[in-house]
Structures are given as structure tokens and as C-alpha cells.
Image (cartoon, rainbow, N blue to C red):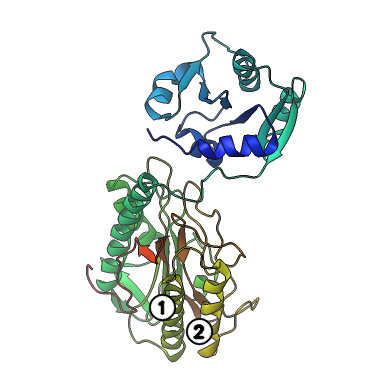
């Protein structure tokens, strides 16, 4: 249970001249989970902030769980078998505490919820994240724990690659051809043993499939080609980790070596830019990566080859959330962002190296300790 920064809601209510804040959604709404810390069901429930009180209106059978997880003032549950709708319960709660006319709601609430609330109130929408992008120390600890599990998964993958033998052009492990799917299963088993779920996000490409940024299919792994592993598990509290490394088993070709050196240098340039800490314009991190890659002869922004994605993104209860390192935003203390330059050639392969860092007042803290090396070794 964590006390969320409800002061941010109060400030937004004052700014909008609103009497209450309402959010209705289910367990798949990451903003609602941020506000409540409640991992409850796949049907709607409501969060209300009114008259200085934060109240969770939870489904009838989820009261005890809600009381364990919610860091606000009160949990209310329906006593009826069927219960009333979540918007109706939000309306009842607001009416108990205030003669409200104007209420604040997130811009992404469902049309059904908005229609119900509009029968009683004037709605004002907001895109405010209520401090979500600025991770608290407790949130950073949760993310660091998931990132530690991701590193254990990466260590397992690297060990498997180091233990392979080459038969013809193909890699074999335990007397069978090694595929991206076999390697993925090894990673995911380690993640599960350390209490996190793969969330369908264990991306492993080999050779040309490395150029598919979200490849989760099956491909053979051959000697001399890049093997790109992007591991993004989710922990029990809903927070993600994010880690990418690239390896080559066997002889390293000219393109593979050049691409790896360029990406490593680009990540170093990005981290050097982050040394300035809070206040750094996010887009300057991306610019430093672009300049480093271009100095090595690789295109940035190209459609078919080079680097065709951003330098990094925020990580929290969503795998991709603000701030983007390609945006005009200024980085703030507590922002948790990936630093993940990469270059790709659909005919040759791809290289990406990704760390997860926390922005501090005077620099950054790297939550990733995993070494960067092109040739895999057994263990770390």
C-alpha cells in the first residue's frame, strides 16, 4: 500500500475550478492502477477524490484486496449481489460529500461512463498524469526489482548462447537446434522463478528478424549473426523493467562489429548527456545519439535501415509512457527512462543496447548493471 501524491489532484481541481475528480475503469487501465495501487478485476470500478478525501469504490467481492492495496482514505464495496454501476457509485459518493456541479475526469474514460456522469455534472476533461511520470522512491524500488529479474533472465539467455555448438551454419544447444522460441522459454522460466511475468514482451530476434522491433515469433539462430534480446517483464505490483542486449556467436562480421561499436558509443553519448540530471531537455539525449550514430556512418530516421525508433521512453505501470527522449519535455527528478539506441538492416540483422535509468537532481542512477559485450559468456 502506497500513499499516492494526491496533492497533484488537488492542484488540478483548483486549476479547473472543479468540485471532484472521478476515474472509472478496470485492471487494464494503468492510470487508474497508478491512482489506486489496486490490481482488481476486469470489470469497472471507481476512484473518487472529493472534499479532500480519496475513495475507492471496489466490486463487492474485492473489498479485502482493495483494503490491502489502496493507499487512500476509504474503500467502499457494494453490498448487493449485482450492485450498481461504477459511475452510479461514484455519483453517490460525490453527493454524500459535496454539492458538486463540475467534476474532473480523464480524457480517456469510456463513452458509457461519460454519458452517465453527464446526466448529473458538467464534465471537465484533463490529460494530467498527477505525478505519474515522477516515480516515488517506493516506485523506483519496485521497478529496480523487476529490472533485477530481467537481468537474471538475460544471464540465462547469454549462458545458453555461450553453451551452443555450431553444426553447419546453425547453433545447437543440448543436441537440438536453438531457436528464438527455445531461448525465449529459457528466459521466461527464469523470470517466473523470480516472481515476475514476461507479459508477452520477451522479444528475441536472430539475423534479419532483429530488424523487427517486436519479434516474438520463431526463427533459427545461426553462427555469426546478431541475436537481439529485449526483455520487458512486469512485476506483481504492475511495474515493468526493460533491458536489451545483443550477442553474436561465432565469427563477428564487419557489419556486426561496426553496428555494435556505433550503438555502444551512442549509448555512452546519451548517458553523458544525462549527466546533467534534472532540467535536461529530453530531445538533447536523442540528438546526442543521432550524432554518434551518424559519425559511424549509420542513418537515423531511415525507414529501411539505420535507427528508426526513438532513443528512449518512460517506464512504469505502462511499458511505454512519458517522457519520450525525443520530446521537448525537460527531464525531472524521478523520471525512469530507457536509453536504447539501435541500428538495423533487414538483410543483415540488428543491434540494440538498452539500460533503464532514473533521473536525479545532478545526474542519473542506472538501474541496469548487466555488462555490455558482443560475444556471450557463460554467466555474468
* Foreground of the two, 340 or 203: 340
Q: What residue is drawn where x is 46% and y is 74%?
A: 273
Percent from the top left, x then y, of residue 326? 59, 67
Q: What residue is drawn where x is 55% and y is 63%?
A: 330
Q: What residue is drawn where x is 58% and y is 12%?
A: 83
Q: Is residue 107 visible?
A: no
Mark 1, residue position: 268
**Neighbour class for label 1 at 10 Å: few (<14), some, many (≥20)?**
some
Q: Quadrant of the C terminus?
A: bottom left
Q: Quadrant of the N terminus?
A: top left
Q: Secondary structure at mark 2?
A: helix
Q: Secondary structure at mark 1?
A: helix
Percent from the top left, x then y, of residue 19? 66, 26
**Marks 1 & 2, CB-CB < 8 Å contact:** yes
Q: Horizontal placement of 1 versus 350: left or right? A: left
The disc at residue 43 is: none
> Does residue 95 lie above or below 258 as drawn?
above
Mark 2, residue position: 292
> As drawn, which residue projects farthest toward the left?
379
Q: Earlier in the sequence, mark 1 or mark 2?
A: 1
Percent from the top left, x then y, of residue 155? 28, 64
Q: Horizontal placement of 379 versus 195: left or right? A: left
Amino acid at each position: 500500500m502506497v500513499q499516492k501524491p494526491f496533492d497533484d489532484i488537488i492542484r488540478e481541481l483548483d486549476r479547473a475550478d472543479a468540485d471532484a475528480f472521478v476515474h472509472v475503469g478496470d485492471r487494464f487501465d494503468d492510470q487508474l492502477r497508478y491512482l489506486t495501487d489496486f490490481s482488481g478485476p476486469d470489470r469497472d470500478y471507481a476512484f473518487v477524490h472529493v472534499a479532500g478525501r480519496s475513495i475507492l469504490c471496489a466490486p463487492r467481492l474485492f473489498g479485502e484486496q482493495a483494503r490491502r492495496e489502496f493507499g487512500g482514505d476509504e474503500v467502499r464495496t457494494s453490498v448487493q449481489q449485482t450492485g450498481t454501476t461504477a459511475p452510479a457509485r461514484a455519483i453517490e459518493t460525490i453527493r454524500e460529500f459535496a454539492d458538486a456541479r463540475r467534476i474532473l475526469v480523464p480524457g480517456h474514460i469510456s463513452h458509457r461512463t461519460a454519458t452517465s456522469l453527464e446526466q448529473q455534472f458538467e464534465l471537465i476533461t484533463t490529460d494530467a498524469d498527477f505525478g505519474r511520470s515522477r516515480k516515488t522512491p517506493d516506485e523506483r524500488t519496485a521497478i529496480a526489482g523487476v529490472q533485477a529479474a530481467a537481468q537474471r533472465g538475460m544471464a540465462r539467455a547469454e549462458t545458453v548462447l555461450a553453451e551452443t555448438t555450431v553444426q553447419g551454419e546453425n547453433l545447437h544447444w543440448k543436441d537440438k537446434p536453438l531457436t528464438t522460441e527455445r531461448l525465449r522459454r529459457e528466459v521466461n522460466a527464469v523470470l517466473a522463478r523470480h516472481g515476475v511475468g514476461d507479459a508477452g514482451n520477451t522479444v528475441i530476434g536472430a539475423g534479419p528478424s532483429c530488424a523487427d522491433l517486436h519479434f516474438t515469433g520463431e526463427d533459427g539462430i545461426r553462427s555469426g549473426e546478431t541475436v537481439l534480446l529485449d526483455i520487458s517483464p512486469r512485476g506483481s505490483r504492475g511495474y515493468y523493467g526493460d533491458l536489451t542486449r545483443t550477442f553474436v556467436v561465432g565469427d563477428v562480421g564487419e557489419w556486426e562489429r561496426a553496428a555494435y561499436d556505433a550503438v555502444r558509443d551512442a549509448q555512452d553519448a546519451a548517458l553523458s548527456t544525462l549527466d546533467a540530471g534534472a532540467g535536461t531537455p529530453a530531445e538533447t539525449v536523442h540528438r546526442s545519439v543521432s550524432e554518434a550514430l551518424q559519425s559511424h556512418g549509420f542513418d537515423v530516421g531511415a525507414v529501411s535501415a539505420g535507427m528508426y525508433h526513438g532513443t528512449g521512453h518512460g517506464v512504469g505501470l505502462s511499458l511505454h509512457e512519458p517522457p519520450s527522449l525525443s520530446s521537448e519535455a525537460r527531464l525531472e527528478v524521478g523520471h525512469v527512462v530507457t536509453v536504447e539506441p539501435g541500428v538495423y538492416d533487414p538483410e543483415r540483422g540488428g543491434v540494440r543496447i538498452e539500460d533503464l535509468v532514473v533521473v536525479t537532481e545532478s545526474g542519473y542512477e542506472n538501474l541496469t548493471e548487466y555488462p555490455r559485450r558482443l560475444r556471450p559468456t557463460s554467466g555474468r
